[in-house]
Amino acid sequence: MITKSAVAVALLLVLAAGCGGSGAVTVGSPSSPLGAGGDSLRECVPDPSGAATTNGFTILDNQSTGTAIIEQVSFYGDQHLHLVDAVVVPMQYDAIGSSEGWPPAPDAINQLGVQWEKRVPAVGARIPPSSAKNGSRNLVIETRPTARKEGIAAGVQVLYRENGSQYELRTHTEFVVLVAKSC
Amino acid sequence: MDIVNGWAGGATIKKPTSIPSTPAKYCVQQATGTSATSNNSHAVTWSGGLGIGTGLRFDASVETGYDTSAQVKYHFTAKRLLCGSKGDPGGTPQQLVVRT
């Protein structure tokens, strides 16, 4: 028979483990290094071929003093949208944004401040504190719709770690790939 | 509504009278054919002195902010920049501005 005290001890152990940083994940807090995920926005990209689309809408703006390390990138609330690849690109000015095709269009990756040649796989990428010197980082995702009409994701989920703590960033930019000529 | 710059709607509603500055780091490229839809009731966007009625070809301007169900959809017929005044469009832009 399980006593109330046993349950209380178990609960305390669970809480203690969480406070130790081994299991607690801070989700979408404004004080998190990469912020709370922003306001809601719906971004639609037409892709008549249904082959590949660039989602470069997410800017990873590290407001902490330490380096954040990305552990996982995925979509959430997604239907018929496959995340093919994700890279992190150093940037100083305008982000790459969203467009049909992959890799992003030459004029997007050759624009001033975008260092496409220094892109790294998103998982394992190190995000330094944003500054004039460091710039920011653009999370650029290759996607592909898996249905004939459209693919959709409620946002991007990024698990990352900074200074021993784990965080989850959920952007609130809904991403729609329409298998059509225009949105 | 022909002109969105200036004041409208009564004494308690104030609109900025100039196009807000948007640091380049708060801009995202929008390819031709894409669209962006904001449900943010505080979204404000500006044209270079143009009103909605004149067409949204560049430095487009539309505004919500006085109706919680308001929605603004930008359809880009040419490559443009979608910018925020206080953050990037996917973050907390406060005001959205479309620029060439």
Image (cartoon, rainbow, N blue to C red):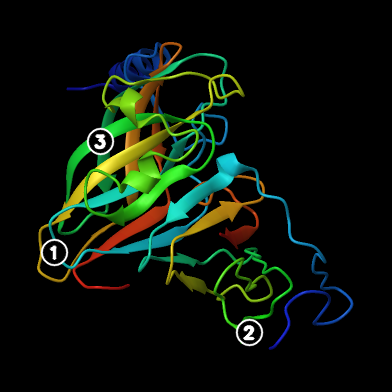
Identify the residue at horizontal 35%, vertical 69% (top origin).
B33
The residue that label 3 is drawn on is: A86
Q: Is residue A68 or residue A52 the one in the foreground?
A: A52
Between the residue at mark 1 and the residue at mark 3, the CA separation in whole angstroms equals 20 Å
Of badges 3 and 2, nearer the viewer stands: 2
Q: Name the residue type under label 2.
A: Thr
Secondary structure type for disc 3: strand
Secondary structure type for disc 1: loop
Q: Chain of mark 1?
A: A
Up-down relation of residue A30 to residue A123 (above or below) = below
Circles 3 and 2 in contact, beta carbons < 8 Å: no
Q: Is residue A76 left or right of residue A164?
A: left
Few, some or many residues within 10 Å of mark 3 (<14, 14–19, 20+): many
Q: Name the residue type under label 3.
A: Ala
The residue that label 1 is drawn on is: A49
Few, some or many residues within 10 Å of mark 1 (<14, 14–19, 20+): some
